[in-house]
Image: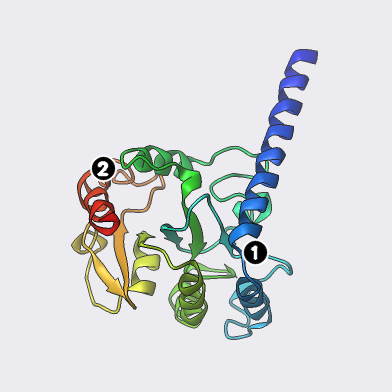
Amino acid sequence: MVLVEKNKKDKFYLFFFYAIILNILFERVDTMELRDIDVKIFNCDACHGMVYKFEGDKTVSIGNKTDIVLVGEAPACNGWRKSGIAWHDVNGKLIPSGVVLKRLLSLIDYDLYDTCFLEAIKCYPKDAKFLQQCSLNCKKYLFEQLSLLDPKIILSLGDVATRSLLNIKYDRLSDVVGNIYNYYGYDVIPIFHPSPISPLSYKGNVDIFENVIKERIRVLKN
């Protein structure tokens, strides 16, 4: 019993040590502009009645690098905004979607912590029926944040994030995944959402990472 408690404490301290390291990295690349955007998001009332807000939220998770930015759908009330590290729960455990993403990124010799993460919708939608309107209202903040991060590649995770970034019409997400699109000068590559609930979360994305993304990285580096 004592050993179990010690292991729990060790994991707890390791998690928060890593959080401190990531916060240091955040400070290295963060700017007053990013913080100002967070303040503007909190004070924004465009989605009044449709979302929850929490004062002091940071809406961008900074990784070791900024050349790949992952854009998700919307934050969950018990998600990374509470833990302080993208893809981790409040106990420091890697969530299932993070496990899938970690495997996919290893295919291009990247680690999950080499990427930045933000959501298309900045606050916490009260209902799925509000997603489309909220994503429209948040577009200006999304563009401001991406402009500051200045990534080489943007990976949009799933349908809501993809529609927030692309000014094209499509019927199904499968019509656009794996293609390269231009978003104000940035390369956007839609992928299937990494949630293991989807049967395509890993196997549907493997070819995209091994061929499309890896080749695009090679071209951009030359």
In the picture of the structure, the residue carrying the numbered disc 1 is: 58
Q: Amino acid at mark 1?
A: Lys
Residue shown at the point (27%, 59%) measured from the top left: 220
Label 1 sits on a secondary structure element that is loop
Q: Which residue is situated farthest in the front direction here?
A: 222
Q: Nearer the viewer, residue 155 or 132?
A: 155
Residue shown at the point (58%, 86%) measured from the top left: 46
Compared to residue 62, the image places residue 204 above or below, namely above
Q: Amino acid at mark 2?
A: Val
Residue density around tag 2, few if under 14, some if 14–19, many if 20 or more, within 10 Å: some
Which of the 4 image quarters holds residue 72? Answer: bottom left
Q: Please provide percent x and percent y for residue 135.
A: 46, 75
Indicate which disc residue 19 carries. none
Compared to residue 54, the image places residue 37 above or below, namely below
Q: Quadrant of the N terminus?
A: top right
In the picture of the structure, the residue carrying the numbered disc 2 is: 206
- Left or right position of 36 against 132: right
Q: Nearer the viewer, residue 190 or 174?
A: 190
**Is residue 149 visible to us here?**
yes
